[in-house]
Amino acid sequence: MKLSVGIITYNEERILGKTLDAVRGLADEIIIVDSNSSDNTIKIAQSKGAIVYTEDWKGFGPQKNSIIEKCKGDWILLIDADEVISGELKEIIKNIIDGKNKYEVYDINRCSVCFGKELKYGGWSNQYATRLWKKGYVSVNDNLVHEEFETGSTKGKIKEKIYHYTYLTLSDYITRFDRYTTLGAEEYFKRGKKSSFFNIVINPFFKFIRMYIFRFGFLDGLEGLIIALFSGMYTMTKYFKLREIEKINLK
């Protein structure tokens, strides 16, 4: 078996079908670990031929390690449920798993599509992320959110794109906003990070300036402005939730 595609899911019906269609003809197996979705995620996955396991949520790192353990392919492509590989990337991956590889681990060019528009500035595109590797060459740390991929191998880079459909609508952003800021605050508390006036008030302001001005987010139009504003609010909310956790644990 050449390639296993792994995906973790929780209420991912919005994009999952498109994600799975993009790897058709490439994957020898598709492994999904689902965290008790209440929408049509499992139905969609099974209709596309995926093998679905249901497991309680353990955090992004542990959940992805669970997938890696289940994959049987010589190569693993571990993508998010809202990531769609381009046709050009599909051909490159075919060549790699057919033996035309110089590396055992690859970072792939990840470009964000937000509110229906591909963002080209503000730090949201051309971000290389570890997605493809030979089985046994990569593990994921135990972070609850913003997990990191660990390897002792030199990594290659693939410039062909994965399209990351981050947020379809503003409502979609706000729904995910609450979950991810909570997970982020819990992860920070676990790592011993502290809230402060600087992190809650000043840091979010500088994040907006960095994204919108210094990284040219204004060139993405209204979408660039909205995502920069909400990114600053994300930082503020995450640290304020950390402050709330700290108060609870002082009692």
Image (cartoon, rainbow, N blue to C red):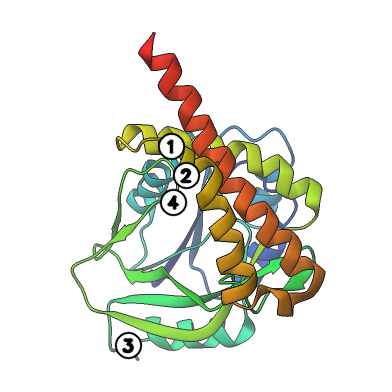
Q: Quadrant of residue 175?
A: top right
Residue 111, image x, y percentages: 60, 74
Q: Which residue is labeled 4 in the image?
A: 146
Q: In the depicted view, which residue is nearer to us: 196 or 172?
A: 196
Quarter placement of the N terminus: bottom left
Query: Would you call the spot at circle 2 few (<14 residues within 10 Å), some (14-19), or many (20 or more)?
Result: some
Please tell me which residue is depicted at 41% across the width and 40% down the height of the picture: 144
Q: Secondary structure at mark 4?
A: loop
Mark 2 to mark 4: distance in Å? 18 Å
- Give the mark toward the camera: 3 or 4: 4
Q: Secondary structure at mark 3?
A: loop
Query: Would you call the spot at circle 3 few (<14 residues within 10 Å), some (14-19), or many (20 or more)?
Result: some
Q: Which residue is labeled 2 in the image?
A: 199
Mark 4 to mark 1: distance in Å? 21 Å
Please tell me which residue is depicted at 53% across the width and 87% down the height of the picture: 91
Q: Residue furthest top?
A: 251
Tag on residue 196?
Answer: 1
Q: Is residue 174 above or below residue 90?
A: above
Q: In the depicted view, which residue is nearer to us: 75 or 178?
A: 178
Q: Quadrant of residue 123?
A: bottom right
Query: Would you call the spot at circle 1 few (<14 residues within 10 Å), some (14-19), or many (20 or more)?
Result: some
Mark 2 to mark 1: distance in Å? 5 Å
Residue 26, image x, y percentages: 53, 75
Mark 3 to mark 1: distance in Å? 47 Å
Q: Secondary structure at mark 2?
A: helix
Residue type at tag 4? His
Q: Which residue is labeled 3 in the image?
A: 101
N-terminal label among 2 and 3: 3
N-terminal label among 2 and 4: 4
Q: Residue furthest left?
A: 152
Residue type at tag 2? Asn
